[in-house]
Image (cartoon, rainbow, N blue to C red):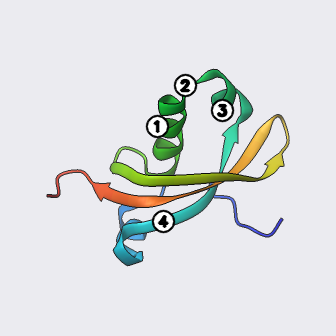
Amino acid sequence: MGYQLREEPLTLAEINKTENRFIEEVIPVDLDVAINNDYESFLDCLEYQLIGDQGVLTDIEYSVVGNGMYDMLHIKVSGYVDLMGED
């Protein structure tokens, strides 16, 4: 496995450390989430798992980079974070 799996959402401090608030992380996603949701709901799940309820992830790109046990996909997700309460 040539990547580190992020199990918890990024903290505000981690988001603010990135250049232009661009993030790129590999997260575990249950196969059921990918199959049983419509496209927008799937993107919402990726966003929530990556940044929680701290803001909105824009310009989302993703790709499956691996898999784990129990029907778990490893998905690399990238995008820009727009934090809540900022103009």
Residue 78 position within the rendered picture, expressed as x and y whole percent measured from the top left = 53, 59
- Name which residue type carries label 1: Asp
Residue 6 position within the rendered picture, expressed as x and y whole percent measured from the top left = 62, 58
Q: Distance between the residues labelled 4 and 2?
A: 24 Å
Whether residue 8 is visible here, answered yes or no, is no
Residue 44 is marked as 1
Is residue 78 depicted above or below 29 in this figure?
Answer: below
Looking at the rendered structure, the secondary structure element under dot 2 is loop
- Name which residue type carries label 4: Ile
- Name which residue type carries label 3: Ala
Find disc 4 in the rendering and name its residue: 23
Find disc 3 in the rendering and name its residue: 34
Q: Distance between the residues labelled 3 and 4?
A: 21 Å
Find disc 2 in the rendering and name its residue: 38
- Tell me which label, 2 or 1, sits earlier in the chain: 2
Q: At x 36% / y 62%, what residue is drawn?
A: 12
Q: How far apart are marks 4 and 1 (CA)?
A: 16 Å
